[in-house]
Image (cartoon, helix red, strand yellow):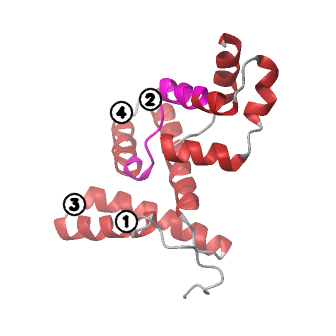
Amino acid sequence: SSASPAISCAPRADPMNLKARIQEDMKSAMRAGEKEKLANIRMVMAAIKQREVDERIELDDSQVLAVIDKMLKQRRESIEMYKKGGRQDLVTQEEEEIAVIERYMPKQLGEAEVGAAVAALIGELGAGSIKDMGRVMGAPPLRSLKYFVTHCFAFTGSKSPTMAMVALLGA
């Protein structure tokens, strides 16, 4: 099925989207005879296809990342349960799956990197005290998103409100 021109986006900077990259990795693993890696990549592709079928859509990169993120969370939860149950063999298997799946996730920022990003945004907005907290947290999404995408690559935002408060109180 081909997308109509009205729906298609402008050409991407990178010619291969995430789903295509996963498919290429699957072909490479097949050619190289890497059975474990191939099985894990097929599992990722199956989860992507399942969501596409369920929702009757073609997933874009952000939706593919959401599927992959969910798979990683499930595996981490399984590891905890297997550790409690003394099943080191299953822990090892889940860790191997995580190693393959994580390759498709963007680099996660550490606390220092998120702090630097929040400080830069505060500086950009000219915020100087805790009174400006609402303005920082409610900064126009385009401005914030552009900054984080440009400078941080992957930003979850989970610690940003706390870091914004700390930065504003320290200002």
Q: Determine the residue located farthest toward the left in the rendered image.
A: 32
Q: Specify start and end residues of the magenta stretch as a single range.
A: 102-119
- Give the percent coordinates (x, y) of residue 24: 32, 69
Q: Is residue 147 magenta?
A: no
- Give the percent coordinates (x, y) of residue 127: 72, 25
Does 18 sit left or right of 1 as displayed?
Answer: left
- Disc 3 versus disc 1: nearer the observer: 1
Q: Which residue is mark 3?
A: 34
Disc on the earlier residue, 1 or 4: 1
Quadrant of the drawing holding the C terminus: top right
| Amino acid tagged 2 | Lys
Alpha carbon of mark 3 to alpha carbon of mark 4: how far? 23 Å
Q: Which mark is residue 88?
A: 4
Alpha carbon of mark 2 to alpha carbon of mark 3: how far? 27 Å
Q: Circles 4 and 2: CB distance less than 8 Å?
A: yes
| Amino acid tagged 4 | Gln
Residue 83 shows in this picture: yes
Disc on the earlier residue, 1 or 2: 1
Q: Which residue is mark 1?
A: 21
